[in-house]
Image: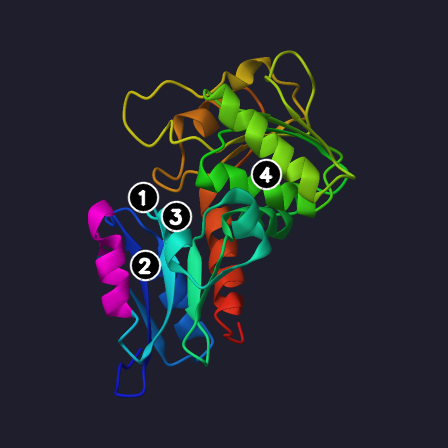
Amino acid sequence: MVIDGNTRVYAVIGDPVSAVRSPEWFNMLFDKNGVNAVLIPLQVGRDDLAAAFAGLKTMRNLDGLVVTMPHKAPMCQLLDELGPAARTVEAVNAARREPDGRWIGDMFDGRGCVRGLRDQGHEVEGRSVFLLGTGAAGSAVAFALAEAGVRQLVIDDVDDQRRVRVAQRVREAFPGVDVQAGELGASEYDLVINATPLGMKPGDPLPFDPAGLPASTLVVDVITKPVMTPLLDQAQQSGHRIHGGNHMHAGQAIEAARFFGLNI
């Protein structure tokens, strides 16, 4: 990749940014598709978001931003327009500059998850899914699963009010899908998804014990580092098929790149 005066610039903003995979995925896509663009990481503190974004908007070769924690929710207040997923989950993870200078944002964590599952041969349409975690990423996954036509979606979170609120919003957006707030329990699901941070740090407890799940259940973790989380390792040892977060983030990069208007 050669950077010159015509290179278009994208950035991922977050705090911290040491673990983000966006530069890896996007720059690989740019290089593979012959796009004269680069994506760089920018560490922006929680209290500095508004000032940083105001400055970034003045940079005329900056075409888009990837947004990660802790900015996914507060970024919504700084943008001129939100897409449908962002409006539902009240968070964004990508924003682009329009020709008239306005900034539009949407959420692609969920659609990236669905794309990643499908790219690995795991269809979600008509399936029964349990999702643990309703943060920005988990809420986006819930939206995208319903959008993709799952038969049943049960959502859980340690925050009971939040899981009920997310289930209600997704149900209102997709009334044809059976969306409920509930617990894993003894029910049988085709897919069980961890969308919590549990597994990122050494010593984290398992978000749930996969050993009690039916052998046919696909165990999914959205965490990218480590690639093999304790949950996935335990699930594999108990004979389950597993699906890691790297597939979600590869799919997310493609979805966001197309949102940026790139022919990828």
Q: Distance between the Cα atoms at labels 3 and 1?
A: 6 Å
Q: Earlier in the sequence, mark 2 or mark 3?
A: 2
Q: Distance between the Cα atoms at labels 4 and 2?
A: 23 Å
- Residues rendered magenta in the picture: 43-56
In the rendered structure, does residue 50 fall within the stretch colored magenta?
yes
Residue at the spot 32% in from the left edge and 59% down from the top edge = 12
Which SS class for mark 3?
loop
Residue under label 2, please give it: 12
Residue under label 1, please give it: 70
Q: Is residue 234 left or right of residue 49?
A: right
Mark 2 or mark 1, which is nearer to you? 1
On the image, the x and y values in percent for residue 157 come to 49, 23
Q: Which class describes the residues within 10 Å of circle 3: few (<14), some (14-19), or many (20+)?
A: many
Q: Main secondary structure of the magenta part?
A: helix
Residue at the spot 30% in from the left edge and 80% down from the top edge = 60
Residue under label 4, please give it: 142
Label 3–label 1 contact, CB within 8 A? yes
Q: Distance between the Cα atoms at labels 2 and 1?
A: 12 Å
On the image, the x and y values in percent for residue 66 come to 38, 59
Which SS class for mark 1?
loop
Q: Earlier in the sequence, mark 4 or mark 3?
A: 3
Which SS class for mark 2?
strand
